[in-house]
Image (tube, grey):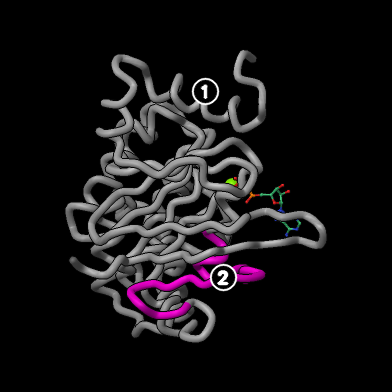
Amino acid sequence: MKPPVLRCRHVTKRYGNFTALQDLSLEVYEGEIFALLGPNGAGKSTLIHCITGLAKQSSGSIEVLGFDTIRDFRTTRRLVGLVPQEINYDPFFTPLESLTIQMGLMGVEPSRERADTLLKTFALDDKRDAYTRTLSGGMKRRLLVAKSLVHEPRLLFLDEPTAGVDVELRRELWQEVEGLRAAGTTIVLTTHYIEEAERLADRIGILHKGELLLVESRSSLMGRHDGRSLEEIYLELIRKADGRPDA
Ligand code: ADP
Ligand code: MG
């Protein structure tokens, strides 16, 4: 069997006295879409930040394709891409400039050809020379996804890609995620939209107060709970973990 693309071993993250992640172990395999579900504050972004180098775990280890994210930081940062939860953009740069700058930041040779391909893929070619601040919300999201891909990451993190996004754009993003996977990218996405995990994920992890309550393939999870929706299964698990089974 191939080694996992991502391996987290006993990862704990503390902020002062507060424990945001508690002894979390998880593996993600090549070519899969893994959905990390959990309520607000569960620790989803914290985990992604530890993996992508924006934060550092307090203990435990994280490997991407066998490289340690602290010891081999330069290597792992080239292997991972991140579409952050917050839309951040450079209002006075054009999409073309944003992509070119991102290539520089990621240490890849700026390539007009690669930028053009990404602009086309994400239907931004008409807007290549417009100020980013004039783009619609959907276009800004697509630009964020394009930026996360300039260095062709093997493992892509999408942190709540569809939070606050309208139905049409949500569906469009789902198609893009499926397209990326078809092109060979392994994907981890966080969401609190159950439907999103149900629709996209091969495997699902449920995170609650910094602890993984469950990691299972979607089909076995659904099969085990004959006829019940993922939402019902999820709510029951969260309530049990909170010690309020009948809530
Ligand atoms: P999620 O992405 O699942 O909504 P987060 O990972 O953002 O959750 O946050 C998990 C918990 O860690 C929250 O209680 C949050 O307030 C806390 N937290 C996150 N970042 C910091 C930080 N930099 N300093 C202190 N606490 C933090
Ligand atoms: Mg978050």
Quarter of the figure that contains the N terminus: bottom left
In the rendered image, residue 61 lying in the magenta stretch gets the answer yes
Three-letter amino acid code at disc 2? Gly
Question: Is label 2 in a helix, a strand or a loop?
Answer: strand
Name the one closer to the observer, 152 or 95: 152
Magenta range: 48-68
Percent position of residue 102, x then y: 45, 72
Q: Is mark 1 within 8 Å of ligand 1?
A: no
Q: Of all residues shown, which one is farthest toward the right?
A: 17
Quarter of the figure that contains the C terminus: top right
Three-letter amino acid code at disc 1? Glu
Q: Which quarter of the picture shows residue 114?
A: bottom left
Give yes or no for contact between labels 1 and 2 (Cβ–Cβ under 8 Å).
no
Which of the numbered marks, if any, corresponds to residue 236?
Answer: 1
- Reply above or below: 34 against 174: below
The residue wearing badge 2 is 60
